[in-house]
Image (cartoon, rainbow, N blue to C red):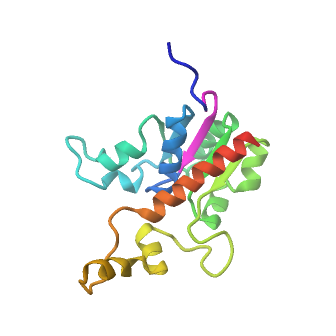
């Protein structure tokens, strides 16, 4: 006999891509949440990371980060796609995305618009450089963060090879994803 999982009954609409957000929602799915991964018609760009075994777009990275999730493919540039996402949000407890602020507003799914659909929703916006300030609208991939923070200078210090290199483990994305998961859990408890 198995017991109830911690987040059973919690529905999360996941409009994230690459690693940061999908890592946070992978943790939520592992804890029992019903996670609905929303992708555009061509899929999350990270589907092509790593060598796929038999099916294109189903590499090990995307399979691991999205295990335990349901999938919904919609084109948010169409009214039908927006309607489909709004219907999912009406039934969701959490909405998480990593779309840049101005772009999510243009799509019609900024904070106020989503709260109008579901007033008690937990709204999580994954950003790399914060929501204001000079870098607010910049994309923040792991290699960008490693370069901006000086992390790319660590390997030369360790092995003597003077060439700056990225640490091949997506540290920034994974740490940020953990904090995203903590934030979701804290908001659910609250």
Does residue 42 show up? Answer: yes
Q: Is residue 118 above or below residue 42?
A: above
Q: Percent from the top left, x then y, of residue 5?
A: 57, 27
Direction left: furthest residue = 54
Q: Percent from the top left, x then y, of residue 118?
A: 75, 41
Direction bottom: furthest residue = 162
Q: Nearer the viewer, residue 35 or 43?
A: 35
Q: Is residue 92 above or below residue 48?
A: above
Number of marks in the rendered image: 0
Q: Percent from the top left, x then y, of residue 15?
A: 54, 49
Q: Percent from the top left, x then y, of residue 78?
A: 56, 50
Q: Is residue 135 left or right of residue 23?
A: right
Tell me the quarter of the image containing the C terminus. top right
Q: Is residue 57 above or below residue 161?
A: above
Q: Is residue 49 magenta?
A: no
The residue located at (52%, 53%) in the rendering is 21
> Which segment did they paint magenta?
7-15
The residue located at (70%, 37%) in the rendering is 90
The residue located at (47%, 73%) in the rendering is 145
The residue located at (47%, 57%) in the rendering is 174
Q: Nearer the viewer, residue 84 or 12?
A: 12
Q: Is residue 80 left or right of residue 52?
A: right
Direction top: furthest residue = 1
Figure quadrant of residue 171: bottom left
Does residue 97 show up? Answer: no
């Amino acid at each position: 006999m198995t017991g109830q999982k911690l987040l059973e009954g919690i529905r999360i609409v996941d409009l994230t891509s690459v690693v940061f957000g999908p890592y946070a929602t992978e943790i939520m799915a592992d804890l029992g949440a019903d996670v609905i991964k929303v992708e555009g018609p061509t899929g999350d760009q990270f589907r092509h990371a790593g060598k796929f075994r038999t099916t294109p777009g189903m590499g090990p990275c995307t399979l691991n980060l999205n295990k335990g999730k349901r999938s919904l493919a919609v084109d948010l540039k169409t009214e039908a796609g927006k309607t489909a996402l709004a219907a999912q949000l009406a039934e969701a407890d959490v909405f998480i995305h990593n779309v840049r602020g101005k772009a999510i507003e243009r799509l019609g799914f900024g904070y106020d618009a989503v709260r109008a659909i579901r007033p008690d929703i937990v709204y999580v916006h994954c950003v790399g450089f914060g929501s204001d300030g000079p870098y607010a609208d910049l994309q923040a991939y792991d290699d960008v963060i490693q370069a901006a923070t000086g992390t790319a200078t660590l390997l030369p210090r360790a092995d003597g090879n003077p060439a700056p290199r990225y640490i091949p483990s997506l540290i920034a994305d994974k740490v940020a994803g953990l904090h995203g998961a903590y934030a979701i859990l804290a908001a659910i408890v609250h």
